[in-house]
């Protein structure tokens, strides 16, 4: 079966090669880590040792969101087990760059593609004692060969209805892969039920809650946020509308709003934090076309930012700290087709949170926030305009919504501890 999968992967790779080549030439994608991805030439590490207190943990996080999720897990693991060595793999370039930035001096590398030769080579070089897959990475060859060497587990597992339907259609092909997992720690009972439907057993599953609620900063006076506040020239009299992980739909909406209300709300400042770094220049052009004077993060200093109403954050890895400056948080990826982005970080700070209707990637979190009146769904430009006006003209009521969000996040925390409890026994 592994070799049949190789043939399928090769056929798909050949079919996609024109698109991959074009993306490589025009956007610089897929060039980095070629040897690691296709051949499994990851760093060659010595054996972790015969002492049971010395273990090498391979954690795989696909991209930026999953990489950020590792922070509380790494802290808890290394606090409990200082002799354990943690190494980290990612799939995307942005995930790789962020992991190098956040988790140095730990080893960071690209995860091999699911070809037999690449997987086996990488396992020989890493020699893991435990492989941890973050959220949902059901690569059959990786799980098949890794499970022969060490336990393989999923943490913070989630399985959307769409993905579950796809796996159900695979039927007997996916069930052997699922059964090779030592354990699956999932965010909620709904996800647990879906894993059961595609072949997991009750013994494999534990509902731990979502790690995304853990490790988020809630103190607006943290060092990094205060540093950015001074850099951006933001005062306590300003009302900051921050659009994070934004796509073009949210950017256009916010820019149009600011342009229309520059004089009516002189205290309003807009901060745009695009999701993808390759879009920074495109968003800069949108800002320029709006006619509003703006400053880019890469060119920012306290003097240039003091009277600036519009700021573009062309940097990665800073969004968490920028959220601490938001009075009003508009969570991106929610008006287009991306399925939304993480709204927990602004909620933890007590910002007044809103997002569009397309948030299926965070459906359970959205439902929870709406149940507690801790967020607002924006369906149209008119609703957005009305919500921003309400936040500015009714600051006490808006602050109450923000406090409800912060309280909710605090109540949901603890998944990291429960997850590491499970890992301790594998």
Image: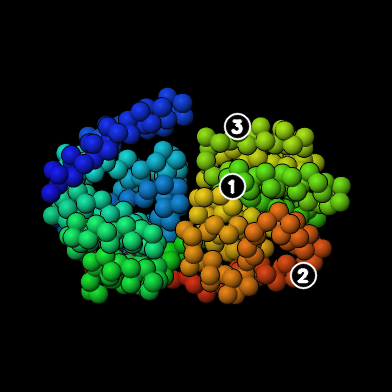
Which of the two discs, 1 and 2, labels the residue nearer the N terminus?
Answer: 1
Neighbour class for label 1 at 10 Å: few (<14), some, many (≥20)? many
Say few, some or many: other residues with alpha carbon within 10 Å of mark 3 (under 14 / 14 to 19 / 20 or more): few
Question: Is any atom of residue 19 visible in this view?
Answer: yes
Q: Nearer the viewer, mark 2 or mark 3?
A: 3
Say which of 314 and 144 sits in front. Answer: 144
Q: Quadrant of the C terminus?
A: bottom left
Q: Tag 2: Cα neighbours inside 10 Å, few (<14), some, or many (≥20)?
A: few
Disc on the earlier residue, 3 or 1: 1
In the drawing, does residue 226 fall left or right of residue 369? right
Residue farthest to the right?
Answer: 263
The residue tagged 3 is 281
Looking at the image, which residue is at 43% across and 56% down? 69
Q: Position of residue 414 (x, y in %)?
A: 44, 71
Residue in the picture at 54% in, 66% down? 366
Which of 362 and 102 lies nearest the eye of the viewer? 362
The circle drawn on residue 246 is: 1
* Disc 1 secondary structure class: strand
Q: Which residue is mark 2?
A: 396
Question: Residue at the location (42% across, 50% down)?
Answer: 67
Mark 1 to mark 2: distance in Å? 27 Å
- First along the sequence among labels 2 and 3: 3
Per the image, label 2 sits on a secondary structure element best described as: helix
Which element is circle 3 on? Answer: helix
x%, y% of residue 381?
71, 54
Quadrant of the rendered image containing residue 166: bottom left
Q: Residue furthest front?
A: 169
């Amino acid at each position: 079966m592994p070799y049949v999968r190789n043939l399928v992967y090769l056929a798909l790779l050949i079919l996609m090669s024109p698109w991959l080549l074009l993306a490589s030439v025009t956007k610089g994608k897929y060039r980095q880590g070629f040897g690691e991805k296709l051949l499994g030439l990851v760093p060659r590490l010595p054996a972790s040792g015969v002492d049971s207190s010395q273990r090498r943990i391979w954690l795989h996080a696909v991209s930026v969101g999953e990489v950020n999720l590792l922070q509380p897990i790494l802290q808890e693991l290394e606090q409990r087990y200082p002799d354990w060595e943690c190494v980290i793999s990612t799939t995307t370039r942005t995930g790789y760059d962020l992991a190098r930035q956040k988790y140095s001096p730990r080893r960071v590398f690209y995860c091999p593609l699911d070809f037999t030769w690449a997987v086996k080579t990488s396992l020989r070089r890493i020699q893991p004692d435990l492989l941890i897959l973050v959220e949902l990475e059901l690569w059959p060859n990786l799980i098949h060969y890794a499970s022969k060497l060490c336990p393989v587990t999923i943490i913070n597992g989630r399985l959307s209805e769409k993905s579950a339907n796809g796996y159900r259609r695979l039927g007997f092909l996916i069930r052997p892969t699922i059964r090779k997992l030592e354990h699956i720690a999932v965010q909620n009972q709904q996800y647990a039920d879906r894993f059961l439907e595609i072949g997991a057993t009750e013994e494999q599953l534990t509902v731990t809650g979502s790690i995304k609620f853990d490790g988020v900063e809630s103190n607006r006076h943290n060092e990094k946020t205060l540093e950015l506040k001074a850099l951006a020239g933001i005062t306590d009299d300003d009302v900051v509308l921050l659009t994070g992980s934004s796509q073009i739909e949210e950017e256009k909406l916010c820019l149009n709003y600011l342009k229309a209300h520059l004089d009516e709300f002189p205290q309003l400042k807009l901060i745009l934090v695009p999701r993808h770094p390759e879009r920074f220049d495109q968003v800069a052009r949108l800002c320029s076309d709006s006619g509003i004077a703006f400053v880019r993060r890469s060119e920012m200093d306290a003097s240039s930012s003091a009277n600036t109403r519009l700021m573009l954050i062309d940097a990665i890895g800073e969004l968490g700290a920028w959220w601490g400056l938001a009075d009003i948080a508009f969570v991106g990826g929610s008006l287009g087709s991306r399925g939304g982005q993480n709204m927990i970080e602004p909620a933890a700070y007590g910002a007044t949170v809103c997002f569009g209707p397309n948030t299926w990637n965070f459906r359970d979190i959205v439902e929870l926030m709406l149940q507690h009146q801790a967020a607002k769904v924006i369906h149209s430009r008119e609703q957005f305009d009305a919500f921003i006006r309400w936040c500015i003209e009714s600051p006490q009521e808006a602050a109450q919504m923000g406090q409800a969000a912060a309280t909710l996040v605090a109540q949901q925390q603890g998944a990291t501890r429960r997850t590491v409890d499970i890992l301790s026994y594998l």
